[in-house]
Amino acid sequence: MYKLLQPLNTNKIKLKNRLIMPPMATSKPDNYGKVTKELLDYYDEKSKDGYFSAVIIEHSFISPDGRAKIGQLSIADDDVIEGISHLANTIHSNGSKAIMQINHAGSGAKKEAVKNEVVAPSAIVHPDNDVVPRELTMREIEEIIKQFASAASRVKKAGFDGVEIHSCHGYLLNQFLSPLSNKRTDEYGGDIYKRIKMHIEVVKAVRAAVGDEFPILLRLAGSDYMDGGITIEDSIVAAAELEKAGVDFFDISGGFCKYTLPIFTSQGFFSNLSEQIKKSVSIPVILTGGVTDIIAAENILNEGKADLIGVGRAVLKDSLWAKKAIESLK
């Protein structure tokens, strides 16, 4: 049997195969971040017939001050629970597990999208933004950690099968991890152990909020691919510590380079990162990035570079991609 078709079962979740639909922003929620019919129809179409073992919902903001842009999905208050529960039900009715990604944009937030000021670990302009953020105070960091926990609790109440914490693509937790954006001199800045202190506290707070049996995924920036940024050596250390803190799955992608680079042309272009992180942890590792061919996905699994494969852009272009790919193996 093809490895891609084999189940992956942990003591917290049972996945029927190794194919994942990763989070991709749609801009289909309304201006307040609420679920719309257009969003429900989109996820219904993409998850039809349950060819993905799990669908990870696009990044959702945990507070009005952490919204990346207008049109982003909200998980910031209890008013959204009913709407996102319809989202979970839609995916479940098609036969896949539903996981929701939660996020704070930090300095990646557009000024018009946030309620107050744009904030960050340090007052350093984001590469994709022109706003000088204000450095977070210790009290504000504590509040954001609580917001992550509250958001995760809402994800569970809405009927999702797991929650994914976003620490990639230049957003707030990525900013704490990266030396490019974290110049703090307190306990949240400095060496790699201090730069992941907030991550550890977020994971522990989320675990306390959702209980021991609810899966926690973390999308980890394997590298910024920029001079002076996150290196794979940093991420290997981070992964080991985050596993100890309570993470159940790692989802590997890029840092400030986001989800791709022009130099990347191979299938699974972050596989060099996922392979090294997989060797350093004992929990499953998801690889997303540039996979458009099902045999390439199978080869990545067989080579031990990942345990699960996320296919995004190919599915964005063709909603039947997963169906065609899975059926081609049978």
Image (spheres, rainbow, N blue to C red):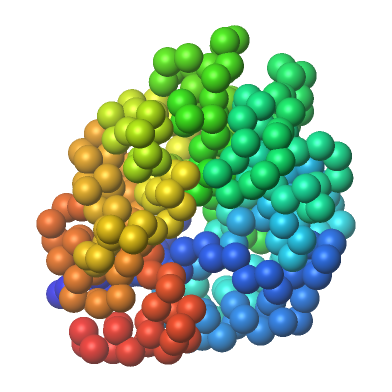
Determine the residue located farthest toward the left in the rendered image. 303
Q: Looking at this view, is 226 or 54 the one in front?
A: 226
Q: Tell whether 207 sits left or right of 306.
A: right
Considering depth in this image, is 185 or 247 the residue closer to the camera? 185
Determine the residue located farthest toward the top in the rendered image. 186
Write the residue at 47% across / 44% down: 256
Find residue 17 and report its image quarter: bottom left
Residue 93 picture location, percent across and down: 59, 80
Q: 260 or 311: nearer the eye?
A: 260
Q: Where is residue 90 in the image (x, y as percent from the top left)?
A: 64, 77
Q: Where is residue 290 in the image (x, y as percent from the top left)?
A: 32, 67
In the displayed structure, would residue 197 be above or below residue 330? above
Q: In this view, does 119 lie to the left or right of 251?
A: right
- Quadrant of image for the N terminus: bottom left
Q: Which residue lies furthest to the front in this view?
A: 130
Compared with residue 163, is residue 195 higher up or lower down, i.e. above or below?
above
Vertical order, 310 against 221 (above or below): below
User: Which residue shows up at 81% across the image and 37% down it?
Assistant: 117
Q: Residue at x 51, y 37 (%)?
A: 174
Residue 318 at what x, y percent from top left? Answer: 44, 86
Is residue 11 in view?
no
The image quadrant that residue 311 belongs to is bottom left
